[in-house]
Image: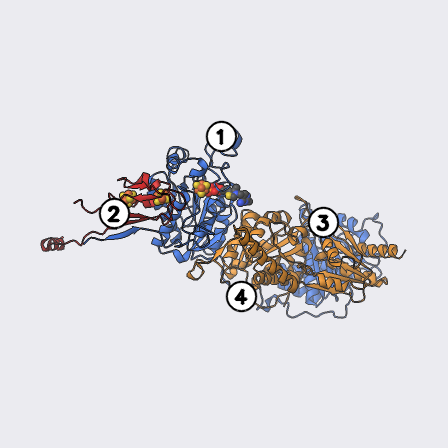
Amino acid sequence: MRQLCKGNVAVIQGAVLAGCRAYYGYPITPASEIAEAAAFYLPQVGGVFLQAESEVAAINMVYGAAAAGQRVMTASSGPGISLMQEGLSYLAGAELPCVVVDVVRGGPGLGNIAPEQSDYFALVKGGGHGNYRNLVLAPASVQEMADLTMLAFELADRYRNPAVVLTDGFIGQMMEPLELHARITSPPEKPWAVRGTAATRKNLITSIHLEPDALEAHVRKLEAKYREAQEREPRHELYLAEDAEVLLVGYGIVSRVLRSAAEQAREQGLRVGLFRPITLWPFPVQALREAARDVRAVLVVEMSTGQMVEDVRLALREQAPVHFYSRVGGNVPLAEEVSARIFEWVETAVR
Amino acid sequence: MASEPRGRVQIDPNECKGCGLCIDACPPHCLVFTEELSPYGVHPAHYLGSGCTGCGICFYVCPEPGAIVVYRLSPPPKVISTTEASRAATL
Amino acid sequence: MAEYEVVHSKSPVFYPIYERKADLKHQTHYCPGCGHGVVHKLIAETIADLDLQDRTIFVSPVGCSVFAYYYFDVGNVQAAHGRASAVATALKRACPESIVIAYQGDGDLAAIGTAEIVHAANRGENITVFFINNAIYGMTGGQMAPTTLVGQTTTTTPWGRRPVNEGYPLRVCELLATLEAPVYIERVALSDNKNIMRARRAIRKAIELQRDGAGFSLVEILSPCPTIWKMTPTEARDWVAENMIRNFPLGVFRDRRLAMPGNGGPPQRSVAEVLGLTSPSLGTEAPAAATPTDTREWKMKIAGFGGQGVLLLGQILAEMGMREGKEVSWLPSYGPEMRSGSAHCHVCLSSQRIGSPLIEHPNVLVAMNEISLRKFAPSVTPGGLILYNRRTVPADLGVSNVRLLPIPAAELADQLGAAKVGNIVMLGALLELTGALSFATAEAVLQATVKNPDLLALDLRALQAGRDWARQLPREVR
Ligand SMILES: Cc1ncc(C[n+]2csc(CCOP(=O)(O)OP(=O)(O)O)c2C)c(N)n1
Ligand code: SF4
Ligand code: SF4
Ligand code: SF4
């Protein structure tokens, strides 16, 4: 059954289906509807919703609920995500699964509440202290807001690590048809959790390993998990990429614009395709290299001054020239704007 | 012969850190530091062998969970005279 | 013959050997004479006496007691600096049957974790907090704590704490006792035998209260730190008695039972019910008479003033499109722009998957006021349609190559007796003029979304009014 649904609300509908029964958060535009939806849905299905005193408290409540083995989540936007970085590091260090949604807005500082993609570094590259990674998923539609939130819970549990849904104000605020697949999941058994029972009495959740050898062993263990994720989890989508001479690369809302831009460019006779990373970490390196094998140029478009483009360049190395185009401050690039860029580049390249 | 002390304590030199809080707190002053150093290099507390009332104070002031064990003399089974017993029954 | 029996010995709530410790597995890591060990013993004794070992979750802080999990044979969760009460909050809510103990030092609880403790207390979380006040940062080597006494030298107050620079010592019990929810707050001290036995009673009471579901309890324990204070253990104990108690008076600051209102919560339903996965009542199952032949791409921008129903009109169009089997997207302007009064939204209707939901060049513009008309009219694609909420259009607009139709929607709505249905009047006109979607679908959507029968009747009349107005427009402008 299709229902017209707001992206932010779809997140919670997916979360409820995924068996999430706890939400701890703090309001911030443009993510607040996620908290509001959680406040509406979770208590009706026996879950917990609590508006915390801050994002610092919220992420540490997430830590507590995750330690107890609950499927738990929070959501925020730039300024709140900055405050949650401490907790994310602890969650990863203590190997606790959780889902964090970042509905990115303009920064730095208070910036504004319009969409940006400027939290890529903060979440894909880390942000908190220590050797850890977040698993990062980037939805590009309302449907994916639900689907990727569900996937995020699965991945978080599979790797016992925080999983992030990195989205933006537009995807969060827009409405599209949402089809919920009535596949109600129950979270996996978590024998490691601490639940105040005889069976879990010997369990310990901690991120301290005082001896250097012990900490090295722990960090190596995390590293091995991350390597496994890099092998198994990269996800991407291709559009018109098969015969493309120019490959556009963008995620989230930008990928939607690039879809239109590719179509427009094709109408004008240039074979343009799209590569959309769905997982930002692990970054779909192999798939990108293959998609770009026969292209003349790659154009990365971001609503940041150049964050994901670093990963594209790392992936492609000398394989193809990588160009970059960006809008920031809450401005979303238009399809016309991007296709005009493509033609400019192609012309200079030919000349 | 002096009557048997009501209490007795045993201090584990493996756990005692020689802080002296028990020695200071013991009302009948029946704890002292040992002359010898423990393997940790401290003078652990030590029971003199008499005078302990089994009050348990040393146990509660000691920060180490297992350094002190306090024993108390279990009261000898009371021989209740039949007259007493019958009087109790009428109460 | 009389026999000696053990009356006090290591609690079974402690591990016999501290295997999690790297070495010296028979001893705690605390300094000789440290108050932490004493408090640990009192807590362990209570847990054992009340038979709560299996149910207990101990949240250790960052501070000298960070390794409390070396010792307590209970469920253990180690928290970030200052966050123990936040972590404990969620643990307790996840496991209501458990006994959750947050154990925090003065830096942890009263400095970096001030917000967390105040709010956990204020919510009346059914947890027990043991607050070890030793007036110093022990673990990090003796910096000032929020509870450091006036004049006390620390590594960061080398001339003593000066209120003019550092303020006064923070009295946590007094502060928390101003809150409504806590049920039990007491300050005790490890200053002498008697006070240690008082501490023992307080600790026991606090855990019993949690066991009985009473609510938030906190026991502050004035506790010696001989190492950092640079005193012998006995001197440190006496310093607690002589200096700390004078600044932090002992006593019960709160002891009452409280019935917190609002226990019921919402009715419990199944996930399928809550998400509407079972009921077709929303009506989206049966698409109304569709116009499947219409494969045109509609890019509509609807703009106006907040309160004119601009966003809602867009949502109705998107909902209708979805019911007719189209791909749809609806994107609002949001945030401060809305607060300033103006609002607009983008609606795409297509037979193909929709690329950018952001419309730069609409082929339909609904301008509910003049400002939006002037702002967006120039962006309408050649051949596009503009519906303007007036009887006449401004003469100086200067757009060409578009159909610009005045539809006095607000006026017609007023005639129907409700200005707020102007957007529905506009919908009627828009459907009539574009044929993008069917009237039957519009009626179905209104029926599904407007529950009040009077309002529904009004909406249906408004829809018809818009349609009628559009119909009587001369053919050449249509
Ligand atoms: C975010 C953060 N800031 C600073 C520290 C360093 N730190 C560790 S313990 C501590 C203070 C401990 O003092 P207290 O809570 O009074 O406990 P005590 O050691 O005296 O028992 C500090 C500042 C930290 N671990 N994390
Ligand atoms: S039990 Fe009492 S009397 Fe005996 S050693 Fe301990 S403090 Fe002294
Ligand atoms: S109080 Fe405990 S640690 Fe200190 S001297 Fe006595 S037995 Fe040893
Ligand atoms: S530094 Fe102070 S608080 Fe820390 S273990 Fe030593 S005596 Fe205890």
Residue C300 location, x and y as percent?
A: 75, 58
Judge: label 2 CB < 8 Å from ligand 2.
yes
Give the chain letter at badge 2. Answer: B
Which mark is nearer the camera, 3 or 1? Answer: 1
Tally of numbered tags: 4
Categorize mark 1 by other alpha carbons within 10 Å: few (<14), some (14-19), many (20+).
some
Indicate the quadrant where residue A280 lies: bottom right
The residue pinned by badge 3 equals A330
Classify the position of ligand 3 by quadrant: top left, top right, bottom left or bottom right: top left
Judging from the image, mark 1 belongs to the subunit labelled C
Residue C431 shows up from this direction: no
Q: Amino acid type of disc 2?
A: Gly
- Is B35 or C74 nearer to us in this picture? B35
Q: Position of residue C131 (x, y in %)?
A: 44, 44
Q: Nearer the viewer, mark 4 or mark 2?
A: 2
**Which mark is first along the chain, 4 or 3?**
4
- Residue under label 1, please give it: C160
Q: Which residue is mark 2?
A: B7
Give the amino acid type for the residue marked by disc 1 in the picture.
Gly
Mark 4 and mark 2: span between their CA atoms?
58 Å
In this rendering, position of residue B75 left or right of residue C343: left
Q: CA distance from mark 3 to mark 4?
A: 38 Å
Eye-nearest disc, 3 or 4? 4
Colour given to chain A in the rendered image = orange
Q: Secondary structure at mark 3?
A: loop
Question: How far across and how far down the image is residue A99, in percent?
Answer: 59, 57
Q: Which chain is blue?
A: C
Colouring scheme applied when the structure was drawn: by chain
Q: Which mark is residue A186?
A: 4
